[in-house]
Amino acid sequence: MMLVVSYDITNNKLRNRFSKMLVKNGGVRLQYSVFEINNTKRILDLLQAKIENEFKKSFGGGDSIFIFETEMRTAVKYGNAIHRDQDLIFFD
């Protein structure tokens, strides 16, 4: 399973704090305000608790967050996003 988190937060400080929280919890930035996170029930519960307890009270009327759950095997990616799922080999 994979989560796709999309957000529109107007306050710069809050938006930066939110994106850092996503990265700390395994988020990989796909676009400026869209992250991909490998999902487990625990991760989804953790994200929802953090949003409720740390962010929700600070949201303005125009702010929004959408969390989509999808299967990796059914996700279709194009462009730069396709490279994120490929193994890398490093030569030293």
Image (cartoon, rainbow, N blue to C red):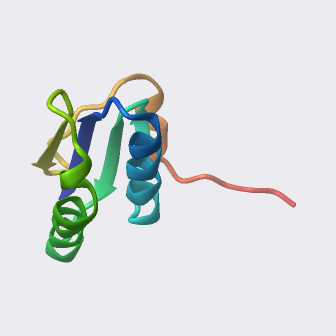
The x and y percentages for residue 55 are 26, 55
Q: Is residue 85 visible?
A: no
Q: Residue at x 46, y 64 (%)?
A: 24
The x and y percentages for residue 20 are 47, 54
Depth check: give the residue in front, 6 or 15.
15
The x and y percentages for residue 4 are 23, 44
Number of numbered discs overlaid on the protein picture: 0
Tell me the quarter of the picture where residue 39 sits.
bottom left
Q: Residue at x 18, y 27 (%)?
A: 62
Residue furthest top as drawn? 79
Against 44, residue 7 (above or below) is above
Residue furthest bottom as drawn? 42
Residue furthest right as drawn? 92
Tell me the quarter of the picture where residue 60 sits.
top left
Q: Residue at x 43, y 30 (%)?
A: 32
For the N terminus, give its image quadrant. Answer: bottom left
41 left or right of 29 in image: left
Tell me the quarter of the picture where residue 29 sits.
top left
The x and y percentages for residue 87 are 53, 53
Depth check: give the residue in front, 35 or 18.
18
Q: Is residue 66 visible?
A: yes
Q: Residue at x 31, y 31 (%)?
A: 77
For the C terminus, give its image quadrant. Answer: bottom right
